[in-house]
Image (cartoon, coloured by chain):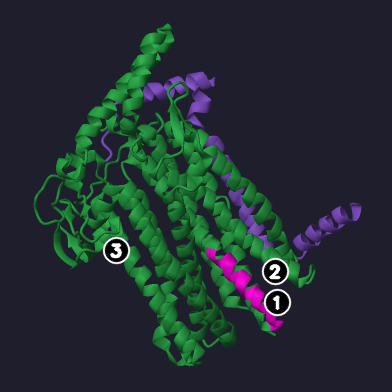
Chain colours: A green, B purple
């Protein structure tokens, strides 16, 4: 399926949010991962007492500061957009998001901000040990900040621990721990942070390889490569493990997303995983054609990933849209009917409450509660609207996985040649290392495309489609702010790249 | 206690004074915050805050959107 661009207001709001989030995500993964790498570099310095490790730590800390300064506050723009472009959504989730975002603010402020100053201003002014603790605190604090944001995102993908209040039109929190420890939230946090560690490792490797190509700062570059490769390799193991967990939770909680990621239209038992392939661009929900023009398949693997059982049934888009009674799958068509009952009863409840007809209000509320799990489906006009953009989900997933498979091989190769002191003669590997800096960013952005495009049309899974989550604004208003941000982000990115390149060019201050 | 406050203040003062790269970064941060503040005032008005005066009105508006709107197709 090839997606066409629909330039309605809601799609401009989606584009603006995607632009802001993707720009924000240029800086965040490097902050999360490089903070830990700084802590490792400094730990080696404190344990060995060798000054060159201090030089290394201070150099990467400088680049960390540049990244942090340009990235700081870009997340605030997302919060502006919630209130402006997505006011229905913001109102409805305010009670759920309030606690995690407040916790994020407290952690970010007290841990990061407090120890940040010691990390930058404290060299030779506080004890080595206290400085090291501060660096670790910055690393832990920044990653804990990410936890709360990702818990909020995880809730949108798997809304648990809440109840809808028809009087306030809000999803109200009933169980904080259920939200915090939701399998989707945990899987999202662990996969996102570990993949961010890979990005940071590739950043250090890319710049170190550039030094090797230029025959500058060779000792700093080689030591940095060793630490970053080990860190990246360990992170790769976690990425693979959490990616597997993520696939399982998606299969259980968002089967339509999994079907789109795999381009499966007709579900089957003993389902194969498409390792690589080209989708049939003419395929539409309901078609019986082969969804692939070309595909390399791994038999039974998708059934294992989705259900931990090689012979289990994995539903396709057609099963989920039109239903499959044999497999006990209720289709979107039936859920739309149920959702419309929920909406009708909600309207009846509100009217009854206004006129003081408690008996009718009670009856309407009871019926609403029976159908509220399908609330979001009531807004769909045709069942095919529940299908996310298949091609974008399918190809983004393969880009992410292919790069995620390549990175550990690169880390091992770099570690092997550097430990044998042969890295200086491996120009091809140095060039690959520089290129991989950019590949890390492509992989992490592709991951977010899979996560967010794959859950469309939902702002809150099954409960609120994006088309209802929006504000009542004109298209022109949203278009204007989209282009303002496009210009602002471009200018800021150029500024960052210039400062970053200048600092890399200056290099570490070696004696 | 007084010494602790004084030492902390001096720590920050000396730290800021000795910044080299940090001056450029702080300049960028302050310019960015000013631009964002300006944009938020000009373009980013919280829709529900600005159009309604009470939470009950906001809730009614959202419920009305939920129960009466026929949203455009999203895919």
Q: Are marks 2 and 1 in contact (CB under 8 Å)?
A: yes
Which chain is disc 1 placed on?
Answer: A
- Name the foreground residue: A268 vs A148: A268
Q: Say yes or no: labels 2 and 3 on the same chain.
A: yes
Per the rendering, the mark at residue A398 is: 3
Range of residues picked out in magenta? A33-51
Q: Secondary structure at mark 3?
A: helix
What residue does disc 2 label?
A: A132
- Residue A412 quadrant: bottom left
Please report, as a chain letter, where disc 2 is located.
A
Q: Does A132 appear above or below A189? A: below
Give the class, few, some or many, for how many residues have Cα within 10 Å of label 3's Cα (few <14, many ≥20): many
Secondary structure under the numbered disc 2 in the rendered image = helix
- Nearest the eye: A8 or B55: B55
Q: Residue under mark 3: which chain is it in?
A: A
Q: Residue at x 20, y 51 (%)?
A: A2
- Dividing the image into 4 quarters, which one contains the C terminus of chain A? bottom right
User: In the rendered structure, which disc, 3 or 1, sits on the residue that comes first in sequence?
Assistant: 1
Mark carried by residue A46: 1
Residue A273 part of the magenta segment: no
Residue A336 locus on image (x, y percent): 24, 31
Q: Is residue A116 left or right of A441 when viewed as pictured?
A: right
Residue A75's place in the image compared with A32, above or below, is above
| Dot in front, 3 or 1 | 1
Residue A136 lies left or right of residue B17; in this view the side is: left
Query: Dot 2, how many residues are within 10 Å of its Cα: few (below 14), some (14-19), or many (20+)?
Result: many
| Label 1: which secondary element | helix
Q: Earlier in the sequence, mark 2 or mark 1?
A: 1
Q: Position of residue A243 (x, y in %)?
A: 38, 61
């Amino acid at each position: 399926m090839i997606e066409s661009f629909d330039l309605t207001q809601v799609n401009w709001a989606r584009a603006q949010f995607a632009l802001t989030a993707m720009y924000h995500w240029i800086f965040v993964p490097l902050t999360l991962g490089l903070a830990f790498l700084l802590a490792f570099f400094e730990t080696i310095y404190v344990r060995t007492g060798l000054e060159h490790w201090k030089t290394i730590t201070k150099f990467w800390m400088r680049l960390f500061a540049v990244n942090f300064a340009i990235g700081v506050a870009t997340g605030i723009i997302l919060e502006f957009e919630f209130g402006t472009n997505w006011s229905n959504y913001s109102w409805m989730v305010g009670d759920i998001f309030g606690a995690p975002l407040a916790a994020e603010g407290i952690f970010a402020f007290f841990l990061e901000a407090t120890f940040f100053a010691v990390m930058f201003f404290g060299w030779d002014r506080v004890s080595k040990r206290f400085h090291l603790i501060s660096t670790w605190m910055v690393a832990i604090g920044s990653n804990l900040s990410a936890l709360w944001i990702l818990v909020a995102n995880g809730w949108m993908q798997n809304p648990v621990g809440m109840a809808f209040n028809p009087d306030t039109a809000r999803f109200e929190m009933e169980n904080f721990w259920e939200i915090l420890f939701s399998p989707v939230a945990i899987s999202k946090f662990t996969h996102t942070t570990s993949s961010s560690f890979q990005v940071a490792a590739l950043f250090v490797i890319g710049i170190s390889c550039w030094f090797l190509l230029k025959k500058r700062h060779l000792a700093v570059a080689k030591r940095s490569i060793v630490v970053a490769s080990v860190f990246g390799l360990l992170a790769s193991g976690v990425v693979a493990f959490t990616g597997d967990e993520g696939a399982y939770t998606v299969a259980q909680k968002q089967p339509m997303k999994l079907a789109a990621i795999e381009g499966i239209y007709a579900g089957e038992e003993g389902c194969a995983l498409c390792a690589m392939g080209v989708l049939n661009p003419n395929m539409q929900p309901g078609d019986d054609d082969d969804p692939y023009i070309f595909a390399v398949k791994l038999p039974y693997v998708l059934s294992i990933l989705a259900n931990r059982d090689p012979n289990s049934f994995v539903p396709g888009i057609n099963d989920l849209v039109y239903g499959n009674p044999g497999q006990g799958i209720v289709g979107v068509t039936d859920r739309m009917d149920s959702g419309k009952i929920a909406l009708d009863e909600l309207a009846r409840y509100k009217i009854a409450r206004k006129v003081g007809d408690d008996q009718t209000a009670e009856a309407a509320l009871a019926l609403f509660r029976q159908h509220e799990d399908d609330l979001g489906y009531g807004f769909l006009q045709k069942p095919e609207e529940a299908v996310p953009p298949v091609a974008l989900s399918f190809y983004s997933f393969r880009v992410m996985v292919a790069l995620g498979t390549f990175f550990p091989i690169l880390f091992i190769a770099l570690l092997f040649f550097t430990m044998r002191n042969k890295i200086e003669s491996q120009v091809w590997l140095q060039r690959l290392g520089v290129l991989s800096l950019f590949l890390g960013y492509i992989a992490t952005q592709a991951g977010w495309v899979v996560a967010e495009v794959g859950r469309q049309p939902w702002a809150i899974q099954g409960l609120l489609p994006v088309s209802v989550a929006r504000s009542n604004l004109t298209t022109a208003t949203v278009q204007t702010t989209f282009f303002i941000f496009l210009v602002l982000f471009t200018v800021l990115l150029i500024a960052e790249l210039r400062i970053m390149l200048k600092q890399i060019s200056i290099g570490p201050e070696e004696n | 206690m007084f010494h602790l406050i004084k030492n902390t203040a001096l720590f920050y003062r000396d730290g800021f004074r000795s910044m080299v790269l940090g001056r450029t970064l702080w300049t960028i941060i302050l310019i960015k915050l000013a631009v964002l503040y300006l944009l938020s005032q000009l373009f980013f008005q919280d829709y529900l805050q600005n159009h309604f005066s009470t939470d009950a009105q906001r809730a009614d508006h959202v419920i009305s959107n939920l129960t009466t709107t026929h949203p455009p197709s999203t895919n």
